[in-house]
Image (tube, coloured by chain):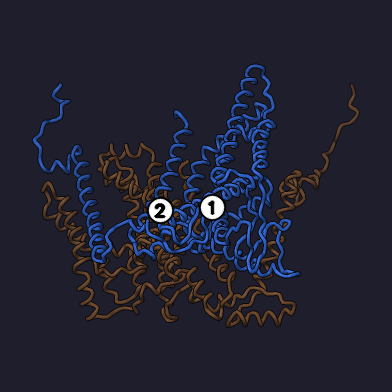
Amino acid sequence: MADAAAPPSEAFRLSMLIYDSRYRSTTIQIVVLILFLLGFFWLANNAVQNLAALGKPINFGFLSQTSGYDINQTLIEYDSTYSHGRATMVGLLNTLLVAFMGCVTATLIGLVGGVLRLSNNWLVSRLVTLYVEIFRNVPVLLWIIVCMLSITSTLPGPRAFRGDDPEASMILFGNVAATNRGIYVPQPFFESGLGSAGMNFLVMAAVIIAGIFFVRWNNKRAGEIQVQTGDRPNTFWVNFAAMTVPFIVLMFVMGLSFERPELRGFNFKGGMQIQAPLIGVWLGLSLYTGTYIVEIVRSGILSVSKGQSEAAAALGIRPGLTMSLVILPQALRVIIPQLISQYLNLTKNSSLGVAVGYADLVATLGTTTLNQSGREMETILLLMAIYLTISLTISGVMNWYNRSVQLVGR
Amino acid sequence: MSLSFVRTEMEEPQPAPSSTVGIVAWARTNLFSSIPNTILTIIALYLLVRLAVGIFPWIFLGVWDAGSLSECREIFAELYPDGREYACWAVIADRWDQIIFGYYSADQYWRPILGWILIGVSAVPVLYPNTPRSLLYVTVATAFVYPFLVWGGTIWPYLMAAVGFGVGYGVYRILAAVTAGNAFSSVIAVSGSVIAAAVWWIGLSGPISGALAEAMPWGIEAFRSRDLAGFALAITIGVVAIAASLPLAIALALGRQSNMLIVNKLSTGFIEMIRGVPLITLIFVAVVLLQYFLPSGTDVDPILAIMILVTLFTAAYIAEVIRAGLAAVPKGQYEAADSLGLNYGLAQRLIILPQALKIAIPGIVSNFISVFKDTVLVSIVFPNDPLGIADTIRADSNWNGIVWELYGFIALVFFLFCFAMSRYSLSLEKRLQTGHR
């Protein structure tokens, strides 16, 4: 009977490459690979030949050449004498800045909206639904343009703030000027800082991190006391003080003060200008992405089965604690992956800022540098590579999180 | 023991206390159940009233009949001497044709309109499974008739493109019959039909349709795609992208689910690369780079190039939706197909894909909504889509200064389309849920 189990030994025939499941997948893969490589080399060969015919073979040397153009919003030192590489860096930082601001605001909108949408207040939940439906069913580019226009065509120009009886006046006790060129707010600076902005920032970060470590140590200590005596000491005020008091003291030592924007000539001088394009892109992205986060938060909270809150009630846990100890930890497992993919979408959508003149990566590298250097291939490939890197980083974080919270078993 | 009182007749039923029924009770439980709730209600009411007072008069007291913004303002000055101004809807009335149809001349408007009706009819059998299957022939025909209606010219190139499929199928049948019994029959037949179709499309269809066009110039006025604008452009890009991307998306999803290493990695790489970059960079590629990747001298129509890149973009996203559908088909279905002795192609076509696509339809519809919304990105490179047309109108000296009326109208049109589609996908989700659980 041993013979029956052994496969019949056949001589290899060419047709087995297709009909024998042992070889078929290899055949298909080789054919696919050959077709892919042929297509790839055809495209690449065309590109190389066409570029060579135009006399501009691929060369990233332009990145170190002088850019020769100004950028209206720079987070690092920059002017037209710096290189194209530096301009790209400025654009990247602007992209990351508006993406970060947008993510924070969209999350706030989403959390508040999601909770309000689930509230048993009929009017409020309908209002939130109205907001969600209106904002998510219209292109985000249109919202960005509308937010930008609501600044540039409804707010008064700086000129209106002039004279003895001005048409417009500064708000918030004369500290903030909302004009059609942007919003001017007081700029913080240190009278007796440590010399450079970087050093000041490092010291502040160090104080905050020390505070966080103290809070963790304090919570651990409270946990140990709870295990020993059954009573958990109240840690809130100590933790609060540990996070705030050293920071406030540091601010006093470094002499924190604010420079208020003032009207000089035809424009505001001093203070910090949050430019109209930044506000437009930021508001537009936040309001649009916020609608998606509202839905994510709502579905996340609804995904926790009712038995969980009933079980918590049966254990005598108060409603507030039920939310924070039972519902939210389980809802977050559903919420966070979707939230991160919305952050990814928001970051990619920030590229639309170019339509309202926001100096992001697309506007600097993808438009002005492209036009100045005439290097279409290099700039656009670099642009795509940078966005791809950002996306892959974010989705890498997401995969790592998914693995770490995955339910074990089942 | 004595009974002091025995009731001999029933009491009349009393109505429920007025505090638990009717509008008062409803308001109590839904609006004023607690102090925070009451505060929320008051804030919401305040916001709602402010919004209504601010917006409704502006909308409903607007002027519909005027030739320019200054005419609108004159009318307002006449009607409201205190200087109040309302919406100047005259711009929509004046430029309606341009916003909707772009640059078609007025006697050609029937073309986009007929095309949209065809799309509506051909979407029915795809969206509603209970309709007669014969409608699917309309769907297939629309794939060739819609481009003919949009771009015009003689009828032959479109007919020849359709004939190419027939040529491929015919060659397949002939080769399969001729080589029957040969070990390589199916390989010869498939590759032969692909080569024949390719030869037809690339080499033969051009000269033949040219000759036919000279002999029998049947057709309608040709239309350059760079004149395609307004919602005609948005709808065309959206429909082309979704229809052309579906086959590619299915192939990519199957590739990503496959356990063949090279196929899997290539599909995954393509999907992740496309999903990792913003659409605007792909539009840049279409407009600026695509000409470099083709043999020198190839004339690339930028709108067509944008359509191709938007199709690739959509395919990557829909592939992920279909992959989720494939993953949601229970493992038993794959095993049942195997145990019936179906090969891979038959198992996918008859068992797996019908179920997976059914699950994926809501996701595909929501992707269609995003593609349709994303068509406005064209305005960053060409002033052709609805937002670009809005810029063009605002640059006109008659309507210089118009802002909210135009953007409000465009937003309204997008909202109506997208809201309807999202309602459909919601109702579909509900229907599918009851079917499966």
Question: What amino acid type is highlighted by mark number 2?
Answer: Val
Q: Where is residue A171 in the image (x, y as percent from the top left)?
A: 71, 59
Q: The blue chain is which one?
A: A
> Looking at the picture, does residue A172 appear above or below residue A228?
below
As helix, strand or loop, the secondary structure at mark 2 comes to loop
Q: Where is residue B23 in the image (x, y as percent from the top left)?
A: 75, 52
Mark 1 on the same chain as mark 2: no
Left or right: where does residue A250 sit relative to residue B220?
right
What's under tag 1, amino acid-wise?
A: Thr
- Tell me the quadrant of the picture where the N terminus of chain B can be found: top right
Q: What element carries label 1?
A: helix
Q: Label 2: which residue?
A: B277
- Residue on which disc 1 sits: A289
Which residue is drawn at the image coordinates 67% and 17% (left, top)?
Answer: A229
Q: Distance between the residues labelled 1 and 2?
A: 18 Å
Circle 1: is it few (<14), some (14-19), or many (20+) Cα within 10 Å?
many
Label 1 resides on the chain identified as A
Mark 2 Cα within 10 Å, few/some/many (few <14, many 20+)? Answer: many
Question: What residue is rendered at 44% in x and 28% in y?
Answer: A409
Q: Where is residue B267 in the image (x, y as percent from the top left)?
A: 31, 47
Residue B310 makes an appearance in the image? no
- Is B150 rendered above or below residue B306? below
Chain B pictured colour? brown
Between B146 and B105, the one lying in front of the other is B105
